[in-house]
């Protein structure tokens, strides 16, 4: 998930888009942008990069096991076919 610094940077970028005439409202807008971004990201139920990497590694190992089992089954089927 994004950390507080990333959210602050996005909020600052959004505030920089506010017309200069509304400069007094920029602090309020920055706080509001920060809150909205934080809440929105929390609702997305994102995983951390570490969690993603762990799951990717697990999936790769599982895929390798499935490939090996499929190869073994094919070998056994071929052997059984030769035996009949």
Image (cartoon, rainbow, N blue to C red):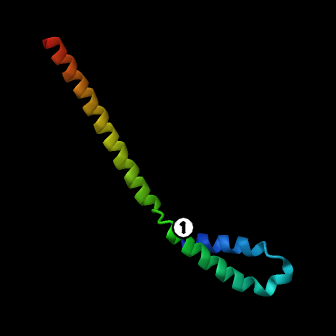
Q: Is residue 82 above or below residue 68?
A: above
Q: Residue at x 63, y 75 (%)?
A: 8
Judging depth in this view, the residue of 41 and 53 nearest the camera is 41
Could you tell me residue 66's position as x and y percent?
Answer: 29, 37
The residue shown at (43%, 56%) is 52
> Does residue 4 appear anywhere in the picture?
no
The residue where tag 1 is placed is 2
Total labels: the figure holds: 1
Q: Position of residue 62 (x, y in %)?
A: 31, 43
Quadrant (top left, top right, bottom left, bottom right) of the C terminus? top left
**Residue 21 in which image quadrant:** bottom right
The quarter of the displayed image where residue 17 is located: bottom right
User: Where residue 75 sits: x, y (%)?
Assistant: 22, 22
Tell me: 48 left or right of 69: right
Residue furthest toward the bottom? 24
Dot 1 surroundings within 10 Å: few (below 14), some, or many (20 or more)?
Answer: some
Residue nearest the viewer, comparing 11 with 44: 44
Q: Does residue 16 appear in the picture of this structure? A: yes
Q: Secondary structure at mark 1?
A: loop
Identified at 79% across, 87% down, the residue is 24
Taking the spot 47% from the left edge, 66% from the top edge, the residue there is 45
Left or right of 60, for residue 25: right
Q: Is residue 59 above or below residue 9?
A: above
């Amino acid at each position: 998930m994004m950390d507080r610094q990333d959210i602050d940077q996005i909020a600052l970028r959004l505030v920089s888009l506010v017309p200069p005439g509304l400069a007094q409202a920029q602090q309020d807008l920055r706080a509001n942008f920060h809150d909205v971004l934080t809440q929105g990201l929390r609702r997305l139920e994102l995983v951390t990069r570490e969690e993603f990497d762990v799951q990717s590694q697990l999936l790769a190992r599982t895929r390798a096991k499935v490939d090996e089992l499929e190869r073994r089954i094919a070998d056994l089927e071929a052997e059984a076919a030769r035996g009949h």
